[in-house]
Structure formats: C-alpha cells, structure tokens
Image: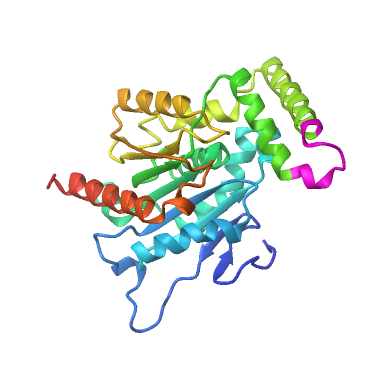
Amino acid sequence: MAVRAPRFPGYTPITERIFLRNEDHSADKPARTSANHDEPTTILIYGWGDAQPRHVAKYADGYHALFPTARIVVIVSPIFAVTYQTLRQRTDSMMPLIDAVFPVHPPESSAEDAERVVLHVMSNTGGIYAAATLNAYRERHAGRALPHRLCVSDSTPGSLVFAREVGRWARAMALGTARWFPWPFAVTKGIWWTFLYAMHLLGAALRIEPAGVYSCRAFLDHAMATPRAPRLYMYSKEDDLIGWRDLEDQAAVAKGKGYTTVMERFDGSPHVGHMRMFPERYWGAIARCWRQSAAMLNGTS
C-alpha cells in the first residue's frame, strides 16, 4: 500500500504515522542481526499526542548516540484519534509496524536475545498506541508477547478516573487546536471538554473500555508485557497534564504486579519536557536501566 512521502529526512515511512530510521548497510557497519549483544536491536518510540515527527526524532537521535547499531521506529499519533478509535482500529493501525519490523516471532529459546527491544512511551497517547502494538503483536504471532527488555514511560500513565483526567485531556487538545479558532483558549478547551464527556458517555452506554484503561491493563498483563522488562518512569511535579501522584500510584500498581520499577523525578520540567531540560540525566537514566536490565537477564546482577 502506498504511503505519503517521508515528512523528515533519514526515515522511511511504514505508514503516514510510523517511520523507520534508515539502517546503515555500509561495509564498515555491522548488520542489525550481528549487532553488539549489549545493545538493543530495536527501539520503538511512541510520541506524545499531536507531536510532530521532527520533534520526536530528537529522541531517536539520543538513542542513536547511545546505541548506534539499533534500528529505531518513531510512531506519532493525533490525540483526536484516541477519542473515537476502537481497540480493533488502534490495533489495525499498528499492524504495519509488526509486519515490517517483527514479521516472525523468534524461537522461544532465543526470543529474549534475538529481539532486544526498548519501548519508549511518551504521554498517555503514546501509551495507548504502545498497548495497541502489544495487542497487534499478540494477534499476529499466535498469542505470544512482544519480547522487550526495557519500558521507558515519559510523563505517563495518568489517572484512570475519567472525571480527574477530562480537564487535562481537554487542555491538551486545546493546545493543539487553539490556532485554528479566533475565540479565547478557554472556549476551545470547553468545547473539547464537552466533546470528550459526550464520547465518554457514549462509550459507557455501549460498554466500550476506555483506551487509557485498556492501555494500563495491557501493560500489567504478563502475557503481553513481560515482567522481565524493568519500567523506568520519568516525570515531574510541574507536569500540568499528568498528575505526578497519579503516575506514582500507577507505578506502585505495576510494582505490586511483579514489575521492577525505577522512578526518575525531575524538578521544574513540563510535560514531556524532561529531556530538553535535563538531557544528561535523562539519557544517563536510560543507559543505566538498560545495563541493569541486561545484567538481570544475563544473571550477573
């Protein structure tokens, strides 16, 4: 199926929302299959809602500096799609990623080493489509889980209580669309608040599980998200879209479900702004957790 041309150089579009960083096949670079076993083979970066690819690409640059042999996939998603897509639609939108990047599931005896995957999830929209990817992988590969070794959660997840989240979601949507309307920002936010509440009531009447609830549930399901992969939570008290106590509560639930959790709280950084303000600390935490994960799986920790 034809897709739009790449919206930024150095990436090959899988779909208009999924981009693969071009792999270097030159003679002096090893192929991905022979990459350093101390590095990831694949890094999946799920951008925040309405993020521009060129902005999310800065995270890909950071990962490339850490792990130059890994292939990198950037996934961007509009917040609006989350408000109406069903799980089936979200899963179908991630199937091209599975077919292009994970066409086969490695033999069970070598799955953890054959595919050394990092999931990097930003904001709740990123989490929702990361969960859809886990579901797509399971569907495509006969109930098997996507083999990953580390999950980095940047400014996610938030509260699962709709009444507590609706104002934050409305503000996020208003930030992305305010330039389209001549009236005050508060009016745009109120319109989105009304829309979100209407969609919530409709979903409740049809007994459709909210996307955010499903994504949190998927990431607590050992059959989809292995507890062998540690969780690194990057967050701040100053985040005005994701409550820091809500995030810590969700991390505590994950810890209670058997996941190793690492909390990295920043001071003064806004929503998905921790890397921009504290790049050395941000990438240092990821590198440290990757080394710890590798040591755990190799039995050396």
Quadrant that contains the N terminus: bottom right
* Residue 69 pos. (x, y %): 35, 67
Is residue 256 in view from this perspective? yes
Specify start and end residues of the magenta stretch as a single range: 177-187
Q: Is residue 11 above or below residue 249?
A: below
Which residue is located at x 76 percent, y 22 percent? 198
Which residue is located at x 37 percent, y 23 percent? 253
Q: Residue furthest front?
A: 268
Which residue is located at x 78 percent, y 36 percent? 185
Q: Is residue 115 left or right of residue 204?
A: left
Quadrant that contains the C terminus: top left
* Residue 77 pos. (x, y %): 62, 47
- Magenta residues, dominant SS class: helix
Q: Residue furthest bottom?
A: 27
- Closest to the observer: 108 or 62? 62
Q: Is residue 186 magenta?
A: yes
Which residue is located at x 61 percent, y 36 percent? 88
Is residue 140 in view from this perspective? no
* Residue 78 pos. (x, y %): 67, 45
Q: Is residue 243 above or below residue 21?
A: above
